[in-house]
Image: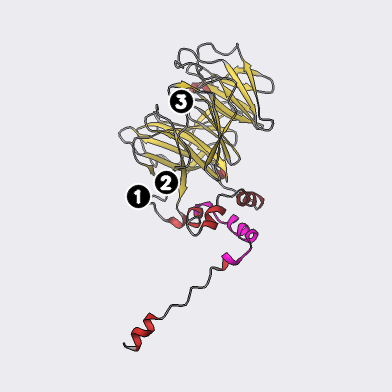
Amino acid sequence: MSPQIIRAQKKQPPEPPCLISLLPDEIVVDIVARVPRCYYPTLSQVSRRFRSLVASPELYARRSFFGCTEQCLYVAISKDQTSDIHWFTLCRKPNGQQFSGTASDHRLVHIPSLPPMPIQGSYVGIGSNIFVMGGFCNWKITSSVSLIDCRTHRAQTLPDMPKAVAISVTELIDRKIYVIGGSDTLSPLKSPSRSMMVYDTDTEMWELRTRPDWEAGKRWFSSVVIGGKIYMRTYYNSFVYDPIEDSCVRDEVLHSKEWWSSCVIDDVLYYYDVRGNCLRAYDPKQRSWGVVKGFEGLLPEACKWSKTVSYTGGNLVLFLQKTEETEIWCAEIAVERREGGEIWGKVEWCSVVLGGNFHIMDCVAVEL
């Protein structure tokens, strides 16, 4: 046997251990807490230790302590708008990497650890959690409440609401969740509810209220919060509800546009008008509508629906689906008010984030 073969058969020296594995746990947590979350899927594949670390409450507590929290988007998606919803999250590949089979570095990724949940429910984000309340489940209206922990992607069951409703408008003010209107029967357009339920997230107590002066027979289907007040819309009117004064007044200027699936940035309401192919903005202080300028022709046209959600850094995220296509597009838009009061937008990126015939039911932003 030649000397070369004998040397090749000798046992190779073991690789030195990774230096970070020799550090105390508290030091490792402080290091990883400063790493952007887009790298966490890669870190979770390094070892069981890192897989456990990226889902630990201690890590996210340190991220909050260091001011490293990021806003993350979770999206409730239904296959045909009648089946249960499944949760996806908007992910970004680090360093400009692209997802397999696409030319995009952004993608909606399914979260398999979360079970199917009721459709047409109410979805509210608080901190790193999402409350899922009510909705249709097995062709019945439910009063169930679930809490999703977005750090671990696990869900737990909470006590039921006082009343079973679906298709409600739901908003958060001062850590209280307002579940307004909706349907308490399987015929939401024929028998909308005139109730309002308020959940105090600190005391974990529900309060059931009745507002007989609300429009009878009208379903509330869109809402936002501006300046501590809830702006709501039916097919026939738009109203502003003040929870402190317990008053509800009509806003005819707001209702002059068919605002839907809106979001709020710096106390200005934004929604994408699929008929006009433009992003509209409503300033409640000036009580006027305007069109956001600066990105004409940069977004897909001829869309059948849109969803907007406020995002980190004063930006908004816009989801669109073109009329003749099944793919879901997404764009991040930076908005700013310039001298003279005009609002301009800049498209940071725009790409297809999900293929297949899916429908986005709602978008929720959480802090992680």
Q: Assign a secondary structure to mark 3.
A: strand
Instruction: Please state the horizontal and vertical placement of residue 26, each as a whole percent of the image.
Output: 65, 58
In this view of the protein, which residue sits in the foreground, 54 or 194? 54
Q: Assign a secondary structure to mark 2.
A: strand
From where the camera sits, is residue 226 visible?
A: no
Residue occupying the point 61% across, 52% down: 59
Instruction: Please state the horizontal and vertical placement of residue 336, each as a whole percent of the image.
Output: 54, 41
Which three-letter amino acid code belongs to the residue tagged 2? Arg
Question: How far is mark 1 from mark 2, CA to CA?
Answer: 9 Å
Instruction: Please state the horizontal and vertical placement of residue 292, each as a whole percent of the image.
Output: 48, 36
Instruction: Give neighbour class at mark 2: few <14, some 14-19, many 20+ (Cα, 10 Å).
Output: many
Which residue does the numbered mark 3 point to in the structure image?
137
Residue occupying the point 69% across, 20% down: 245
Q: Assign a secondary structure to mark 1.
A: loop
- Which residues make up the magenta segment? 21-38
For residue 107, which numbered disc appears in the image?
Answer: 2
Q: Is residue 33 magenta?
A: yes
From where the camera sits, is residue 269 visible?
A: yes
Q: Is residue 179 magenta?
A: no
For residue 102, which numbered disc appears in the image?
Answer: 1
For residue 308, which numbered disc appears in the image?
Answer: none
